Amino acid sequence: MRLEVNGIHFSYGRRRTLSGISFTAGEGKVTSIIGPNGSGKTTLLKCITKILKPSQGVILLDGQDIAGMEYADLARRLSYVPQGTTVPFPLTVFDAVLLGRRPYIRWNVSQSDQEITARTLVLLGLEDLSFRYFNELSSGQKQKVILARALVQKPELLLLDEPTSNLDIKHQLEVLAFLSSLARKENIAVVMIVHDLNLASRFSDQIILMDGGKIHASGSAGEVIVPFHIEKVYGIQAVYHADSGKPYMIPVDLQYRKEQ
């Protein structure tokens, strides 16, 4: 799956939220979108999923414009995990994950649907929790269940809005390492919003830095997470360690953002 975003603009009323967003995300790669709150990151993901309709520009999946795709067809090709996703009513872990098969279910759940669900639970190490209720789980376990539900759709493109929010550092590392491995093994294009710049640096093949509804910089971690861009966009000074090619930064002070 190749995602191409070309010249996307979007406004909420008169307030321009996205301006001329263009980038590509390839299969087997992890693309992280970073940037301050209010920079348009979530709005961008919602445009890619057709939750929102851009005022200009096109979004292509393997060359096909999503504007002409039926929602059912789109759901078989991509999965979207919004921030704060949960299960609103009592379900076991198995049934909560099985819900992700909805794009493929006509009348009854098939044996294939159940087998795919079972394999996905094993993949994420959740098989021992299959018959526990979702609301009994820890935050880290719940996040893995939500991810499993997205994966049983068998997507070619996986979109995630802050998949590590509310997780401790161990579970953050587990989730992002899993996504990185999944992208390569299953040849899935993963696009995710991440607030922790060091985690984005470590686990991303491509980083897109947004500011004010525009792409300020894009490229590898070594090209994007550098003093010039971080000071310009976030208004902070930091100490950088980049010996591994995956920059690690320690914020040390605030600075006033210069006028554009």
Image (cartoon, rainbow, N blue to C red):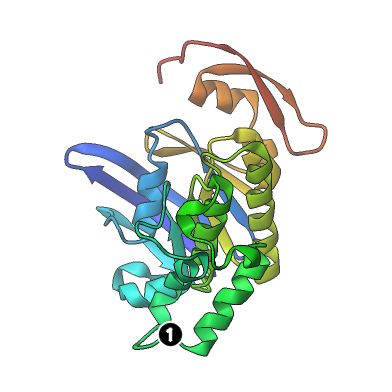
Image coordinates for residue 55, horizontal then vertical, percent: 24, 53
Residue reaching furthest to the left: 13
Report crowding for label 1: few under 14, some 14 to 19, many 20 or more residues within 10 A (C-alpha). Answer: some
Amino acid marked by disc 1: Val
Which residue corresponds to the image point at 60% horizontal and 71% vertical from the top-left? 120
Of residues 12 and 172, the one drawn nearer to the viewer in this rendering:
172
Image coordinates for residue 26, horizontal then vertical, percent: 58, 62
Q: Name the residue under label 1.
A: 109
Q: Is residue 129 left or right of residue 64?
A: right
Secondary-structure class at tag 1: loop
Which residue corresponds to the image point at 68% horizontal and 22% vertical from the top-left? 250
Which residue corresponds to the image point at 44% horizontal and 51% vertical from the top-left? 22
Image coordinates for residue 191, horizontal then vertical, percent: 53, 54
Which residue corresponds to the image point at 48% horizontal and 34% vertical from the top-left? 35
Does residue 19 sit above or below 259 in this rendering? Answer: below
- Residue 13 quadrant: top left
- Residue 239 quadrant: top right
The total number of labels drawn is 1
Question: Can the viewer see residue 2?
Answer: no
Question: Can the viewer see residue 104?
Answer: yes
Q: Quadrant of the N terminus?
A: bottom right
Q: Is residue 51 left or right of residue 126?
A: left
Q: Quadrant of the C terminus?
A: top left
Does residue 249 sit above or below 44 in this rendering? Answer: above
